[in-house]
Structures are given as C-alpha cells and as structure tokens.
Image: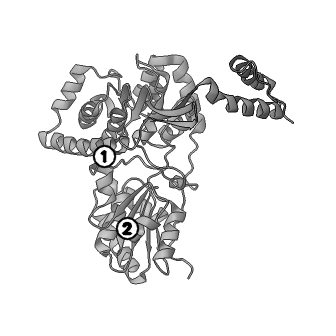
Amino acid sequence: MARIYLKKAEKTAATSADTTQNIVRNMLSEIEAGGDARAQAYAAELDKYTGPALLDDEGIAEASAKVSQKLKDDIHFAHDNIRRFAEAQKGTMKDMEYEITPGLIAGQRMIPVRAAGCYVPGGRYSHVASAMMTVTTAKVAGVHNITACSPPQGDAGMNPAIVYAAKLCGADQILTLGGVQGVAAMAFGLFGLPSSDIIVGPGNQFVAEAKRQLFGRVGIDMIAGPTDSLILADKNADAHIVATDLVSQAEHGYNSPVWLVTDSTEMAEDVMARVPALIDDLPELNRENAFAAWRDYAEVIVCADREEMAACSDDYAPEHLTVQADDLDWWLSRLQCYGSLFLGEETTVSYGDKSAGTNHVLPTSGSARYTGGLSVHKYMKVVTWQRSTPEGSKRVAEACARISRLEGMEGHARSADVRLAKYFPNENFDLSAD
C-alpha cells in the first residue's frame, strides 16, 4: 500500500530558505574589525539595548532577585535532571589504552574543549530551558570556561530567569547580546571573553547562518533549521492527546513542521478535526504560529501497517519522534532516525523540551539521519596517543617505509629508516616498495 496523504504540506524548509547569508557575512566582518564597540552598536540598533554587554555579579544578583521562588524550584528540578543524565552519558566515555602488537601501545583520551559559547534564544520566546540544556552539559563535560549569551528585551535587559538559570548551571560569564553580534562576540573573544572553541544552542535563521559561516574557525553543535516533530500513532492512540501534542509543537514557529503517521484513517481524521479548535484556544502569538505551521507545513499520512509507518518515520528523520502505539519495545528496537524518542503517551516532547533531563538541542531538517543532539560528547575531543619499545616499532617501521615509498613519500620512509638503523644496526631490511 502506498502512503496516503490526508494532508500534504504546502511548503517545505526549502520554500522558506532565507536570504541572510550576505547580511550575516557583512555583520561578522564588521564586528571582527570593529570589536566591542561595533557589537554594542548592533545591540543598540537591533535590540534597542544600551546597557552593559557583560553582566557583573551585581547585575546577576539583581536579575535573580526578580525570579519567583516557585520558578527557581522548577529550574533547580530541571537542572538536576539534566545534570544527572549528562553525568550518566559522560560515564559511557573513558580513556583507554590497548597493546596493538607486543611493545606498541596506543590509546585515547577524552579532553573537553577549553571554552564554550552557549547561545540562548530570547526573542519570540525566552528559552530558559535552553540555558540549562547547553550550560549544564558543558559544565558536566568539564569545559574550563563557559559563556552564556542571550538577547536583551530592550533596555530591560535579559530575561531574569535566563540569567538565574545560566548562573545556576555553571556559566562563567553572561553576555547580554543577541543574534549575530552575540555569536560573533563569543567566537572572536570580545569583551574580555576567551574565544570560544565551540558555539552551541538554537536560534533564529541569523544565529544559524552565523554558526554556519564560522564553522571551521570554531566548532558548532549543528546548523539548526526550524524545529520539527513527528507522531507515530496506531488505532488505539488517544486522538485528543495526539492532536494536543501536534499543536504544542506547531506553536514553536510559523515554519515548524508537524507530521502524523498512522495506520488508521479513522484516528487520523479524528485528530485533524480536533486541531483547529485546539489552535484557536491558544494565546494570540502562539495561535498565529501554530495556525501557519499547521496550514503550510503539517502532514497527515496513512500507512498500511507499523513497518511502513516506521519506514516513513525513518525517511523523515524527525527532530522529535513520539510513539503512541502498542508494543513500545518493538518501536524502540525498529526506529533508527530521530533526534530524541518519546515512547508512550505518558511522556511528550514538551517534557524533553523543558524538564525531563534529555537534551532539547537536536538535529532538524532530516539531519537525524547522520547525527544526534547536543550532549557531553559534543564538548569532548577524542584524541589518540601511542608509544612503543624499539622491538615493538620494528615491524611497524618496515611496513611504514615500504608503504611510504609505494606512495612516493620518501621523507616519511626515511623517518622509519633512521629508527631501524638506530635500534637494529646489525640487521638488513628490504625497505624498497617492490
């Protein structure tokens, strides 16, 4: 049975491809040349913010005092979950060494980067959770210096809850700059900051483009597009919960795709009938985003059976993947392409976005085919080393010399020759390529 589209997207990510490359390229060039002053000029122009770029201890304390104790308790709860999951992840990574041949020992070390820049969106929505996701994982990884960066809301400055969360999670500096100027400040080491070795975190198309253009000069977690979510639901799924979860993700933005894949036409039609009322019940800004996302980017697909549903999901490789279907263990073992997986109606993408502990900085636009999301691993370099006894290097040197000469790399061959001559002066070796 071919996949049947009860709803087909009017647009795709390619439809809304931005034209920001030249804008970002010029901004990065100007900020690198003009330094702190040019970055702050952009803050005044774009964010209407004229305050200090770096928050001092007094500014952090002042912002923290504006956060209610109830919200602080929730931030502590979420931070603790994120930290403990990150620590468990780090526990899977370890230094090792292995004797490849007698006398030749090689190994690996796990070394955290020295400085990380964590971008926290604060425009349309103030993503307090992003501060926790990015800073906490960097801290657990052992990064020596962590800068959290988030845009101001005019001269009111950064959202106080973002300030509080960033400080709690281990940020060494908190930078009140948004967009390209914030990313550039962390990359170039402005305002007395260390130049970031890696820049992580979600953001709008200008943030994503700045990271793309800086990649290579600095590391990045990924180039993120609009957030996307897919739900796999069988005939026994609760249509109201499915519809609510689709709408909850559509509110991210006007171009945030949501997809429903099912084996039940009846269930799919029930969900589609419920969505409009759920969207209408949202606050105005959320309603506008969800309405546009559902109208232009949403798809509802009916498949023959669960195997076809799983294959369809793998083709889409969603950022967020929810399964509301029987036999969850089967789905866990079968599904292969997703950023983060949510099994059963008892969990939801919103939990992962805010407080469950798994990271919400995830691959979008199908990139879950080849990469996972942000974790302690992204901040760690897996480096290798080796050492050897003279006897252990003997066979390696012979092979190295002959392979090097076959490739025409005589200098490489001679670095092997001199060791054989020193360690084994009374032996004759055939080191020709033939």
Q: Say which of 207 and 411 sits in front.
A: 411
Mark drawn on residue 306: none
For label 1, the SS is helix
Q: Answer few, some or many: residues within 10 Å of disc 1's Cα (few below 14, many 20 plus, some between 14 and 19).
A: many
Q: Which residue type does callout 1 highlight?
A: Phe
Query: Which of label 1 and label 2 is nearer to you?
Result: 1
Query: Please, which colouring scheme is shown?
Result: one colour
Q: Is residue 365 above or below residue 100?
A: below
Circle 1/circle 2 CB separation < 8 Å: no
48 relative position to 80: left or right: right
Identity of the residue drawn at 32% across and 75% down? 239
Which mark is first along the chain, 2 or 1?
Answer: 1
Query: In the rendered view, would you say 365 is above or below 432?
Result: below
Residue sitting farthest toward the right: 434
Q: On the image, which quarter does residue 414 sit in?
A: top right
Does the image show residue 123? Answer: no
Answer left or right for 35 relative to 146. Answer: right
Q: Is 434 on the left-hand or right-hand side of 31?
A: right
Where does the image place residue 42, in percent across and percent down from the top left? 45, 26
Q: Position of residue 215 (x, y in %)?
A: 56, 34
Quadrant location of the N terminus?
A: bottom right
Q: Quadrant of the C terminus?
A: top right
Give the residue furthest to the left.
69
Q: Residues within 10 Å of mark 2 (few under 14, many from 20)?
A: many
Locate residue 269 relative to residue 219 in the image: left or right: left
**Residue 189 visible within the image:** yes
Label 1, on which residue? 85
Give SS at disc 2: strand
Q: Which residue is mark 2?
A: 323
Residue located 36% across and 47% down the image: 359
Q: Nearer the viewer, residue 332 or 100?
A: 100
| Alpha-carbon span between mark 1 and mark 2 | 22 Å
